[in-house]
Image (tube, rainbow, N blue to C red):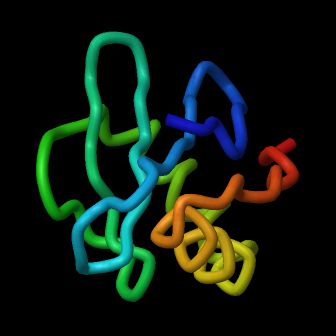
Amino acid sequence: MPQISRFFGIIISMYFGDHNPPHFHAKYGDQEALISIDDLSIIEGRINKRAYELVKEWALMHKSELQKDWELVKNFSLPEKIEPLS
């Protein structure tokens, strides 16, 4: 599972050939959530509220890059790294 960004202890990644809808995985400690690229809602799992707010802030700034990475991993290609939230 390629890691595309990491910030404030949050790891953002995508699985090769993953299922629709387009999403990414956000891990924080022992918590993990699948987050929709389209509306940034949690599709599955859970993550602490503060971490989720940081993830949404980051994702809003990088939505087009996330969509591009989704297309890459869907076709089993390496995604590009995305700048972390600072």
Which quarter of the figure has residue 58? bottom right
Q: Residue at x 39, y 12 (%)?
A: 29
> Which sits in the foreground, 47 or 17?
17
Does 78 sit left or right of 46 as displayed?
A: right
Q: Is residue 27 above or below residue 22?
A: above
* Residue 62 x %, y %: 73, 73
Q: Residue at x 70, y 86 (%)?
A: 64
> Which sits in the foreground, 65 or 49?
65
Q: Is residue 11 above or below residue 85?
A: above
* Residue 22 x %, y %: 36, 77
* Residue 76 x %, y %: 54, 59
Does 41 sit left or right of 58 as displayed?
A: left
Which quarter of the figure has residue 32? top left
Does 3 sit left or right of 15 as displayed?
A: right
* Residue 42 x %, y %: 22, 61
> Which sits in the foreground, 21 or 44?
21
Q: Residue at x 63, y 71 (%)?
A: 72
